[in-house]
Image (cartoon, helix red, strand yellow):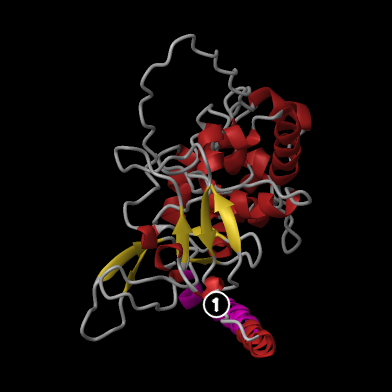
Amino acid sequence: MRGQASFDGEAMKRIREAAPRHDRERPGLSLDELAAGVGTTRRQLIKYEQGAATPEPARIAQLAAALGCEIRDLTIGETAAADLAALRRGAGLTQRAAVTRLRPLLTRPQLRVSSWLLAETEAGRLPTTWSSPESRARVAAALAAAYDQPADRIEAVLPAAPAAAAVPTTIEPQAVVAYPLVKSAVDTWYARCPSCELVASPTSVSYRMNLDRSVDWTVPATLRCSQCGTEHQVTPFDLLPHDSEITCPRATCGKVTQVPAEAVEVVCEHCGLCPPGPAALVDPQLANVASHVRYGHTLKMQAAVQAAKANNALTGGSATFPFLLDPGDQ
């Protein structure tokens, strides 16, 4: 079921029938009036009230606004909604919307937050990134603010930190952990840059490999942002799922590449062209921001090259520019 399992159709009907009216003495909203207010149909509202269908979190938020009530008023009581995912849905948020609301609450110092980390937490597995007592307390406080819930209720449903593994007395071969978000091709790695906050395919990736040619995640990988040029470390939890696709605009290519929906720039896996990503196509303002960030990075590189050439002319040495090269080119 895609909607919110804890949605209370009977509560919605009671609130609708008791809604105050100023244009007539008799209270209550008709199904047609409510349908017009939330952009759906009378038939769909009847399904909601009879329990034949459950609305998405965004639709619940629209219904609450139209009825003049809180989102929690349209959900079943605390006993039925006593898990973290239900509290999120009760706040009218998808996982991606919840992550967007959590990011400003987990800064200074910045604490990583992504849909993957939130999904792991909702599944009862507190990620290592959030497992320290300080990080867990910050995440709990941020969730309480984002979901408009008491802090003690969030603490009650937040998974406990994983117990420290015992040190083995003998060396045994370790199984390689498979991370579904990690692709074999380097160009398919996407993560949000902590410096410019943009998502784009990195210009270079540095990582360590196991003997079986898989990525060794005991050490973070290093990505160089193609927009602002800064390097940042990532773990598999920081990599974004490829939940969208882009068609290469090159007439001789036209192939489809799977990419994250948040990407402002992508790399065609077939011909290497760098067209705008799904986020930039949907939001032209975001495309302008990415263009300005890239332009500023270009000016900085040009200034660095000119300074290195001037220094080389004075000292008689030979200037090299490692920041213009990928690790494999050096």
Establish if 322 lies above or below 18: below
Q: Does residue 261 show up?
A: no
Q: State the image quarter where residue 319 is shown.
A: bottom right
Establish if 162 lies above or below 229: above
- Name the residue located 42 percent from the left edge and 57 percent from the top edge: 189
Q: State the image quarter where residue 132 is shown.
A: top right
In-image side of 95 versus 300 (left or right) = left
- The rendered magenta stretch, by its main secondary structure, is classed as helix
In-image side of 201 versus 297 (left or right) = left
The residue tagged 1 is 320
The segment highlighted magenta reads 279-301
Establish if 263 lies above or below 274: above
Secondary element type, mark 1: loop
Establish if 14 lies above or below 123: below
- Name the residue located 63 percent from the left edge and 24 percent from the top edge: 161
Q: Residue furthest left?
A: 252
